[in-house]
Image (cartoon, rainbow, N blue to C red):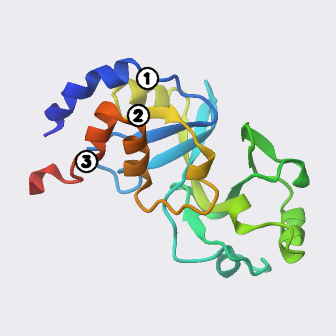
Amino acid sequence: MKENFSDFSSIFAKQLKPDKGILLLAEPFMDSPEFGRAVILLTEYSQKGCMGFIIGRKLNISPAQAIDDFPVFNSMLYYGGPVSSDQLFYLHTLGDKLEGSVEILPGVYMGGDFETLKALIKEKMIAPAQIRFFAGYSGWKANQLNKELKENSWIVTPMQNDYLFGNKEHKNLWKVILRNMGGKYSMISEFPENPSLN
């Protein structure tokens, strides 16, 4: 069934270039337990390697349940990817409130001082809609992502902050983004996950 996707080769030919702050959407037939139908926000893109977070896979656990001495906070942990899955990472809108945080795109930051973060949570100075926590991240070694892009493994599209923060809970984020992109992308969003079952 993969050959049916060749009708959409023009989409890949006209894609945005990958960069920090850009989204990667898995092509619809990617056969991978980690990355099938994944939406990944790239937080680092260079010749040395790339890093990002799967942004739509909520785990059934809170940061306070997963980490010792973490304050109770009305937020859930998300699966960011298979690399360092025993470590906590976070994306947020706090900017300078967290010393050491790095801006990924306008208004979206990664990391920052962990002790300050815990103190701000204890003092109720952070709302759950301002931060998202991840277990692990997605990583590519030098030129690995470029190779996957040449193989048409990923659809590249701009990030919108409401995909990550705010009150919207996108249960099918991959499909939602493709529908929002319109045209042939909307058609791709309706492709079955397992074509052999149709």
Residue at disc 3, secondary structure? loop
Asked whether 41 or 159 is in front, the reply is: 159
**Residue 5, image x, y percentages:** 21, 33
Report which residue position mark 3 lands on: 190
Asked whether 76 or 189 is in front, the reply is: 189
Report which residue position mark 2 lands on: 155
Q: Residues within 10 Å of mark 1 (few under 14, many from 20)?
A: few
Q: Is residue 190 above or below residue 134?
A: above
Of pointers 3 and 2, the one earlier in the residue sequence: 2
Asked whether 79 or 180 is in front, the reply is: 180
Report which residue position mark 1 lands on: 15
Q: Amino acid at mark 1?
A: Gln
* Disc number lying in front (3 or 1): 3
Asked which quadrant contains residue 119, the reply is: bottom right
**Residue 164, image x, y percentages:** 60, 53
Q: Amino acid at mark 2?
A: Ile
**Residue 121, image x, y percentages:** 83, 72
Q: Is residue 176 above or below residue 147?
A: below
* Disc number lying in front (3 or 2): 3
Q: Residues within 10 Å of mark 3 (few under 14, many from 20)?
A: few
